[in-house]
Amino acid sequence: RAKAEGRNRYRFFEAEMTVAARARMALELSLRPALAREEFELHYQPRVDLRSMAVVGMEALIRWRHPQQGMVPPQQFIGIAEETGLIVPIGRWVLREACRQTRRLIDEFGRPIRVSVNVSARQLAQPAFAAEVREALADTGLAPSALELELTESALIEDLERTAAMLGELQALGVKLAVDDFGTGYSGLAYLRRLPIDVLKLDRSFVLQDDGRISAFDFVKAFVDMAHALQLSVVAEGVETVEVLDFLRAASCDEAQGYLLGRPLPLAGLRSLLGG
Ligand code: C2E
Ligand code: MG
Ligand code: MG
Ligand code: MG
């Protein structure tokens, strides 16, 4: 009897797996033609300078308008896109679209606006990546200094030798390089000595917890001071409360993003935010 029960439980598990696997496969199948069908769009989250409190830039965040499922958040499809390699053409589209739209905003508002674009490990590993960035800038007329590429620690340390060469090429173009979700990995800091990084984006979790020996404020303050000594600027992610905002300003953090300062918005929404 125990054996039969075990078998039933196993069958049940298998059926559940199949449901999940089927959903995933369906998503993967509809992801393939999504680019050609123009189902992607970019939303933009404002980035604020913590001294002037002015919007100085924005992060481009991809959205998928699925014909049946409606808006699919990136967490549900970026992983699949990375595993299948689809992230390479999708990422190329994101880069060009972000450069094109930012160039238009700069022309409209007559002032500098920076855009940050998320780049996956898979994209960074393409030998032609720097050439693609150069072409995107040349074709859209966006100044290289207006573009920042966000890379995760895991992407950076995957192959440090090759990453150093690629980042050197990107730096030579004049684009800015940022480490995204900084403080969530366990990769240590040695790579910062080897790679031409300009910006650290402190993960939300870094700023929040006040549960140990050292207060969150002291920890962030010490980090910002270290970063500044290394000529890095610091951007805080996920700012949701005035308390955290005040704390970051007191810690001399340079810039911030978060729901308190502005949610990711479609281009039209960002346009009215910049105008108002
Ligand atoms: P990320 O690059 O760390 O982006 C920040 C995420 O935090 C965004 O989620 C943003 O909407 C969310 N966020 C912003 N402010 C707050 C806040 O105050 N509180 C909280 N709880 N969350 C906040 P989103 O748009 O769902 O994107 C999730 C992740 O998907 C991104 O994390 C990034 O890793 C990835 N992603 C998004 N667009 C792209 C893309 O074009 N290419 C690649 N490769 N990855 C992308
Ligand atoms: Mg990011
Ligand atoms: Mg981030
Ligand atoms: Mg994050």
Image (cartoon, helix red, strand yellow):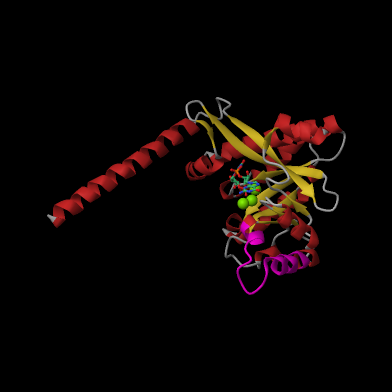
* Nearer to the camera, 134 or 40: 40
Residue 188, picture quadrant = bottom right
Position of 77 compared to 133: left or right? left
Q: Residue at x 64, y 37 (%)?
A: 94
Q: Is residue 140 visible?
A: no
The residue furthest bottom is 213
Position of 54 compared to 85: left or right? right
* Nearer to the camera, 138 or 86: 86
Residue 221, picture quadrant = bottom right
The percent position of residue 91, horizontal first and vertical second, equals 61, 39
Q: Is residue 19 visible?
A: yes
Q: Residue at x 75, y 58 (%)?
A: 248
The percent position of residue 247, horizontal first and vertical second, equals 75, 60
Quadrant where the C terminus is found in the figure: top right
Residue 221 is inside the magenta segment: yes
The percent position of residue 30, horizontal first and vertical second, equals 47, 31
Position of 16 compared to 128: left or right? left
* Residue 63 to residue 242: above or below: above
The residue furthest left is 1
Q: Residue at x 72, y 69 (%)?
A: 218
By secondary structure, the bulk of the magenta-drawn segment is best described as helix
Residue 24 is inside the magenta segment: no
* Residue 269 to residue 147: above or below: above
Quadrant where the N terminus is found in the figure: bottom left
Magenta span: 205-225
The percent position of residue 269, horizontal first and vertical second, equals 72, 32
The residue furthest right is 110
